[in-house]
Amino acid sequence: MKKLHTKKVTAQKRRTVTLIVSALAVVLSGSTFVMMMLRVTNMHVVFYLTLGLSILIIAYLLIWTLAAGEKHKRLAIILRRCYLICFAIGVAFFIILQGLIISGAKTDGTEADCLIVLGAGLRSDAPSLILRTRLNKAAEYLLSHEEVPVIVSGGLGRGETVTEAEAMSRYLIARGIGENRIWKEELSTSTQENLLFSLGLMEEKGLDVDNAKVIIVSNEFHLYRAKLIASKAGLDASGMAAQTPGLFLRVLYSGREAFALAAEIVFR
């Protein structure tokens, strides 16, 4: 009798812990979602990572709670094994994806007929911190290669009054790049569209896209996927890596990029 009472108390404690932690996870995920909607800097990355971690924790706690009762103990053991197997596979896949991201995180092109700078969001109609690193890298190259044009690629985002391409163009002009060298692609809303629409713009401008030397300018964590998408679109491009500032941001964006790369490999 005492043993049965102890098991009931244990089950009750586990349910309480699960409810409290689950509630906190939901509140935290909801808070980061609201901040993302309010366009707080880099909060979209924090939201997706928080949501993923919350799902993992809640799933484990539910299995842990189920294991407290004799009635569902066998089921809990099976579910826990499945959870651990899936978790191990996920970690292994994540490590492989990070290896691919790191392998592409470098500049592998120095001669270009055209640069493509990929958009990365605006803040108050000005380039975001991440986007500024890309534009600074492009400007550095363009100032020493005065014959090379540049495509700035990015459409109108939520809450923005100018396109990313327009904001990027203004930024480069302010750093001494001639307006006639800047080609604006103002319709895209994703990396896929960035590159596909930029390819069309290159053709409009008379570049031989089959033979032109094209360099994609993006952050180091993004280059592997960007070049993969370019290859699928029929564009043989090199990469130019802009360094993401700070270890914290590099870890955040590399983590998020692994999921984006997985989606690109599996679903497209």
Image: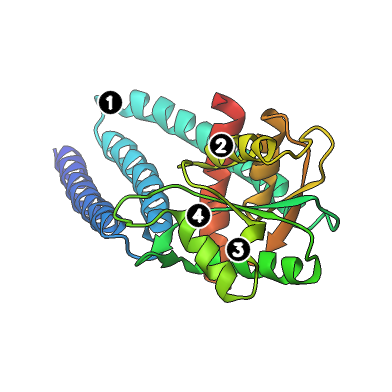
* Residue 246 location (% of width, % of height): 57, 73
Q: CA distance from mark 2 to mark 4?
A: 16 Å
* Residue 92 location (% of width, % of height): 63, 40
For label 1, the residue is: 72
Instruction: Quarter of the image for the C terminus: give it.
Output: top right
Q: CA distance from mark 3 to mark 1?
A: 69 Å
Q: CA distance from mark 3 to mark 2?
A: 25 Å
Mark 4: which amino acid? Ala
Report whether residue 35 is seen.
yes
Residue 83 or residue 247, whichever sits in front: 247
Give the image quarter of residue 109: bottom right
**Counting residues from the N terminus, which is met first, the one under dot 4 or under dot 1?**
1
For label 2, the residue is: 192
Tag of residue 179 = 3
Left or right: where 167 falls relative to 10: right
**Counting residues from the N terminus, which is met first, the one under dot 1 or under dot 2?**
1
Report whether residue 88 is seen.
no
